[in-house]
Image: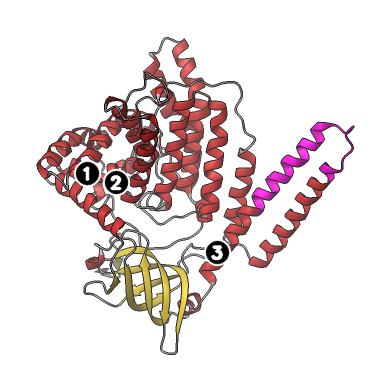
Amino acid sequence: MRRAGGTGGADAPDGGPLSVQGDADAISPARGAPAPEPAPVPTGPRQEGPADLRLAVPACAAWAAAAWAVTADGRVVTVTVTAAVLMAAALLIGTRHRRPAAPTGRSGTSVAVAAVLLCAVAGATVGALRAADTRRGPLPALARQYGQATVDVTVTGDPRATRPRVRGAARAAPAVVFEAEATRVTTAHDTTATRTPVMVIAPPSWSGLLPSTRLRVEGRLAPPSREGDRVAAVVRTRDHGPPPVVEEPSALQRAAARLRAGLRTATDGLAPDARALLPGLVVGDTSRIPPDLEEAFRATDLTHLLAVSGSNLAILIAVLIGPAHLATRAERRGLAARLGIPLRATAVLGACLALGFVIVCRPEPSVLRAAACGLVTLLAIGTGRRRSLLPALAAAALLLVLYDPWLARSYGFLLSVLATGALLTIAPRWSAALRRRGVPPRVAEALAAAAAAQAVCAPVIAVMAARVSLVAVPCNLLAEAAVAPATVLGFAALAVAPLAMPAAECLAWLAGWPASWAAAVA
């Protein structure tokens, strides 16, 4: 049943370690923790021997080093990185000049330790460089002085509403916040070019801004609420009218916005819960979700349904290619096979589908993370060899941390990796145990997947939210049945809406049934 009395929207930026701005990743004790992001249930492959953890250790080293370096003193990072490079070089040189009669195990250990050290060096270096971007230029100093400035910014994230707040006896004015990159800062004395991440607080009339839009914002600067945030300053605009646009968004972002708007229009006639939930389930658009529905999903650990997840992409590609373990065989299935599309063209279509998914759902860290984890799960279904999949997951995590070291301090990213790893390692064994006790195979796999993901993620959720949901596993099992039909029908409505709105409304009506079921479970 739904629990009333929650709050909606997004918090005003407060940043901080282990925090990520964004609908999918924003976590604080006030908002609670998102449930682990469940990937599609693997039905084909089976575990082949012990798990291959060789790449997991270097990935964890890079992860830990990046998480440390983004908030550490630059001089300390430099000394530590230099020492690690010298140690790795000494190990590799010693291995090269070791006598042939020496035991091979010692050489292998030296190479492995050197690899771990070098991955840690890479993570620390990228993290320190990215953190330096937030301290470079005039913005941090102006923010510490709460100075006034005119800032040219490029929008990098969708505006989202702040939580209702009360100041004294009065309620604070509503506002929206969005992430941006400052490119120029103009003060009373000079103008300086820069590239610095900032957070902008603006009136609700700016809620329609799209990523890649360039603005000229006048306002007061302030430092982030917590030390070590991924933004260098918070810009509170003084404009209360329409946004001062300097350059319109890119053609790709305009096309994505039309598709998202078409989906919202197609869902206008649905029941309130389905109307609110379907855009969030399909493209991560949570602008319509009321506070009580958001609170209900949080209480049942179903908040992953309110954001784009790797399972969405996996479901869409599975519709295109059919069962992945048959994709390269003559008996392959899926929409591409039914239409007679050759295998190579199908692979190109799959890549285009993944690219379109990232563009429509916004190329934010949460979406990139979801796409990476979803592709790893697809690999699990397709290869039938789970021993090679943990290295793939570790490589995906390593590359994403090096791409955006702030992910190393994201609870959402940690939960995604843990949940995917549980599906690749723990779930197959639990599923086999259930089948030996007479549980039907598909039921056993569904139970094992939900229980394994919840088991590894529950300790993290308990630490950061100080709570444990006793209904998370059954609620996830019940709601998961609605994800695939709602995703497929919702994306079909999104694609058809620009061409034939009546057909899109029909598809949205069909997708509304599973969406309503998920809301009823919450």
Q: Residues within 10 Å of mark 1 (few under 14, many from 20)?
A: many
Q: Which residue is mark 2?
A: 283
On screen, residue 288 above or below 456:
below
Residue receiving disc 3:
131
| The C terminus - image quarter | top left
Query: Where the N terminus falls, by quadrant?
Result: top left
Are the residues at dot 2 and dot 3 in contact (C-beta closer than 8 Å)? no
- Direction from residue 10 to residue 64 in the image, left or right: right
Relative depth, front residue between 29 and 407: 407
Q: Nearer the viewer, residue 277 or 350?
A: 350
Under mark 2, the amino acid is Val
Tag nearer the camera, 1 or 3: 1
Amino acid carrying mark 3 in the image: Ala
Dot 1 lies on which element? helix
Q: Looking at the picture, which amino acid does disc 1 mark?
A: Leu
- Span shown in magenta: 94-121
Which of the two discs, 1 and 2, labels the residue nearer the N terminus? 2
- Do the CB atoms of the residues marked 1 and 2 lie less than 8 Å apart? yes
Residue 105 vs 243, above or below: the answer is: above
What mark, if any, has residue 494 been given in the picture? Answer: 1
